[in-house]
Image (cartoon, rainbow, N blue to C red):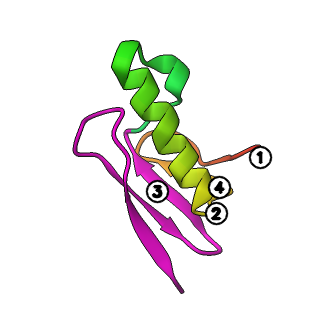
Amino acid sequence: MDGVLLHTPGHSDDSVSVVIDGVGAFVGDLRPPESYTGQAAALAEKSWQEIEGAGARRVFPAHGQAVDLVV
């Protein structure tokens, strides 16, 4: 099983997410971009684009239920 570790700022500058092929993305405390303001929103948007670009179709946050990405 292959995967990738991504730098995904938004929640904090040092946040990372792990995308595992065929499983999904483990994103920690990264929330949807609309839940942030200012520069954090822009960083979160870019982070989500990176996660989707890495092939993630299911997201496992640190808090709450897993969700499917709509792409």
Judging by the rendered image, the residue that carries numbered circle 3 is 26
Query: With 54 as the anchor, is 42 left or right in this view?
Result: left
Q: Residue at x 77, y 46 (%)?
A: 71
Residue 45, given in percent of the width and then of the height, sits at 51, 33
Measure how far apart labels 4 and 2 are at the Cα level: 9 Å
8 part of magenta stretch:
yes
Q: Which residue lies most toward the top here?
A: 37
Residue 71 is tagged as 1
Q: Secondary structure at mark 1?
A: loop
64 part of magenta stretch:
no
Q: Residue at x 54, y 53 (%)?
A: 51
Q: Earlier in the sequence, mark 3 or mark 2?
A: 3
Judging by the rendered image, the residue that carries numbered circle 2 is 55
Q: Secondary structure at mark 2?
A: loop
Q: Residue at x 46, y 43 (%)?
A: 47
Q: Earlier in the sequence, mark 1 or mark 2?
A: 2
Tell me where residue 36 sits by quadrant.
Answer: top left
